[in-house]
Amino acid sequence: MKLGIDFKRRLTRNLTSWNTPNDPSPGQYTFKLVPGGLPEFFLFQGPKKIYASGPFNGAGLTGVPNLRSQDFLFTVVNSPDETYYSYAITNPQLRSRCRAYSAANVSGGINRGCVIWGVDLMDMRQYPAVVQDVFIRLAQSEVDALIAAARRQRPNRKLLIAGVAAASGVLLLGAILGCCCFWRKKRQAKTAPSSHSDVLPLRHRKHPAASPARNQRLEENRMGSEKDLDLPFFDLEAILTATDDFDPDSKIGQGGFGSVYMGKLEDGQEVAVKRLSKKSVQGVGEFKNEVKLIAKLQHRNLVKLLGCCIDDDERMLVYEFMPNNSLDTFIFDEEKRKSLVWKNRFEIIMGIARGLLYLHEDSRVRIIHRDMKASNVLLDRNMIPKISDFGIARMFGGDQTTEYTMKVIGTYGYMSPEYAMDGVFSMKSDIYSFGVLVIEIITGKRNRGFYDDELDLNLLGYAWMLWKEGRGVELLDEAMGGTFDYDVVLRCIQVALLCVQVHPRSRPLMSSVVMLLSSENATMPEPNEPGVNIGKITSDTESSQTQTGISLTETAVDAR
């Protein structure tokens, strides 16, 4: 039997219940495999999920680990052409019809399958759920003997009831005494002075969500060697209540940091909670880095950090919630990008530019983001862009302008050539990423995913070709509605091409970028060829090891 999806033939195989025991038309229950990640089965009652089997781990379904059988062969196939789950009987001689040896009605759902077993019974056990009945064929004389033996072994009912009642009473009394001792200790701990008054302790409350964010200084042993920071600190219970114990339905994103959940605090404020994954690409160091950097930053076009939570192995950041999600969900979506008119796109470009200008030149510390991309730009209720995700950002001090790293972390398509190849990053690296992002906003196409087979060009190469031929306006997204100013569009394209030039020194600073974008009469230099490999990128993965063509430097690239 096979359940799953055949993508090539556009065929779906599900199990659908009967409408009633006497009506075989499709009912309201459907049991089907849902692709994406590891294959997993769900039982739907109409559109509502009411049961999940857990993903297949190579040996069985994790949600029903006790289901094992030596008589069945289970197979899971997950490929671009099809995703399905199948099982078959290993010994064809065991196959039989259920009605052959029992009066059970298959349509009534009494049985789930039947085979004939002709040898000794062994390894029989009772499972807590999802079991099958066993029908044993015996002579009448054997049945009578079994019934008589069972009656002789039946325990005294009165003694059994008395024993159960006594044991229940003892357990109940013990539970009451335990609760009294527990709450007594909690009241004493609440009133006792703390030797660590600068850290908000984890307290069990009747209403956990009523634990508000309070200004606390993080302990030095919790933040390594970093300096103490004045930062709102949330109780773990407040986070658990806000996110409904990290309900999967509250999950709104996944990244190198871990998972992002939507939550609601006691005062009704909606928040986004970034929870550090123990297996994430970004670790505790990146968490500390993000806390340290964002705590110092305040700008209209930067996502606002409301606080953090550190409790044992749990590390979380609490941000303001962005109801319109990230920029990539708009500009790369066939339907949503139609509603993103030029006025909105230009305001988003300007907002990102002002945010980067603040990071590079106007904040108390100079910040190099290192991972500027569409998915790291969030949109609030009014479509105002907010730069987010400072996990791999670096802080420059004094007159520092560049830095070198052996570990290149970023996203293909947005990394500048000098950073991707040699590990050298600076403000000009962010400016290159900004230029790529502007081209993507204008065209509605991904730089990494675009490729013209006939011209052998990626998106930046294609934009450069149209610009040289005086056809730059053809880059404008055809799906975009509304009106637009050709001069403003061309000015944005020219600024973007200036930002992606091959030599970092040729790229303008963000102060110049903001001035060029906002000024109608500014005189702009002509851009040079983009700093990319104009040909097709042959790697199909986001993480690979690359070598420069003219040097002996080998750089390990960890893509996010």
Image (tube, rainbow, N blue to C red):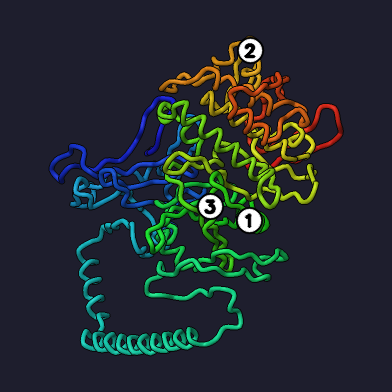
User: Is the N terminus in the top left, top right, bottom left or bottom right quadrant?
Assistant: top left
Q: Residue 455 carries which label?
A: 2
Q: Which residue is drawn at 61% across and 54% down?
A: 294
- Which amino acid does the dot numbered 3 rest on? Lys
From this view, report whether residue 16 is shown above or below residue 233. above
Is 526 in front, or is 326?
526
- Which amino acid does the dot numbered 1 rest on? Lys
Q: Is mark 1 on a helix, strand or loop?
A: loop
Q: Residue at x 26, y 57 (%)?
A: 137
Q: Distance between the residues labelled 1 and 3?
A: 11 Å
**Residue 67 visible:** no
Q: Which residue is drawn at 55% across and 16% down?
A: 473
Q: Residue at x 67, y 25 (%)?
A: 537
Is 498 in front, or is 102?
498
Residue 52 x, y percent position in the rendering: 37, 51
Name the residue tied to disc 1: 296
- 248 horizontally vs 308: left or right: left
Category of crowding for the residue at label 3, using alpha-carbon neighbours closer than 10 angstroms: few (below 14), some (14–19), many (at least 20): some
Category of crowding for the residue at label 1, using alpha-carbon neighbours closer than 10 angstroms: few (below 14), some (14–19), many (at least 20): few
Residue 325 x, y percent position in the rendering: 46, 42
Q: How far apart are marks 3 and 2 (CA)?
A: 43 Å
Residue 415 x, y percent position in the rendering: 68, 35
Circles 3 and 2: CB distance less than 8 Å? no
Name the residue tied to disc 3: 304
- Which amino acid does the dot numbered 2 rest on? Leu
